[in-house]
Amino acid sequence: MTDRLPHEKGFHISWDQIHRDSRALAWRLDGHGPDDGAWRAVVAITRGGMAPAMIAARELDIRTVDTISVKSYDNQTQSEAAVLKRPDDTLMGDGTGILIIDDLVDSGKTLEIVRSLYPKAHFATVYAKPKGRSQVDTFITEVSQDTWIFFPWDMAMQYVKPYRGE
């Protein structure tokens, strides 16, 4: 047990870093789709998966992009995962040829619920924590379970006092 707050072991991700890591994810996925290496569509898990999915869709030249909305957090508190919006069933089928992208897998609960809907989809995240890693088929960077990732869309630029003195 630790007295550390979630933000005290933080991994701060810049826009540049999420862009580089999302491109690396796309490169890793290139040529691994079931249709002669191609993917039929990209589905972003909202909201965190939207930026990585958009970048991957561009890099892989995938024009069919949709979203699935799963709520599993209230600020920094994880809650029961619930699907709020799903892609069209005609597009999705059992998930064959579909690339589902999220920014991070933490406990794996979000991906578990989406995988139950689309068992043959390919699940990719930019970052993965050990508890949820088994739910991901492809990822770029693993971080420890007790690390809190600060994404650029959650941050704002602000003045910080100098470490020493005024």
Image (cartoon, rainbow, N blue to C red):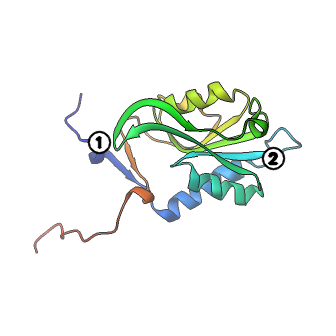
Q: Looking at the image, which residue sits at the far right?
A: 36
Image quadrant occupied by the N terminus: top left
The location of residue 4, given as percent across then percent down, is 22, 39
**Residue 108 in view:** no
- Residue at 87% across, 41% down: 35
Is residue 58 rendered to the left or right of residue 33?
left
Is residue 121 rendered to the left or right of residue 1?
right
Q: From what the image shows, is residue 111 above or below residue 49?
A: above
Q: Looking at the image, which residue sits at the far bottom?
A: 166
- Residue at 18% across, 70% down: 162
Q: Which residue is mark 1?
A: 6
Q: Are circles 1 and 2 on residues that touch, CB within 8 Å?
A: no
- Residue at 47% across, 30% down: 81
- Residue at 49% across, 63% down: 15
Q: From what the image shows, is residue 16 above or below residue 44?
A: below
**Residue type marked 2:** Gly
Circle 2: element type: loop
Q: Which mark is residue 34?
A: none
Q: Which mark is residue 31?
A: 2
The location of residue 159, given as percent across then percent down, is 25, 71
How far is the residue under mark 1 from the one under mark 2? Answer: 38 Å
**Residue type marked 1:** Pro
The location of residue 161, given as percent across then percent down, is 18, 69
The location of residue 163, given as percent across then percent down, is 17, 66
| Rendering quarter of residue 57 | bottom right
Pointer 1 local density, CA inside 10 Å: few below 14, some 14–19, many at least 20? few
**Residue 68 in view:** yes
| Rendering quarter of residue 68 | top right
Is residue 37 rendered to the left or right of residue 166?
right
Pointer 2 local density, CA inside 10 Å: few below 14, some 14–19, many at least 20? some
Marks 1 and 2, the one that precedes in the sequence: 1
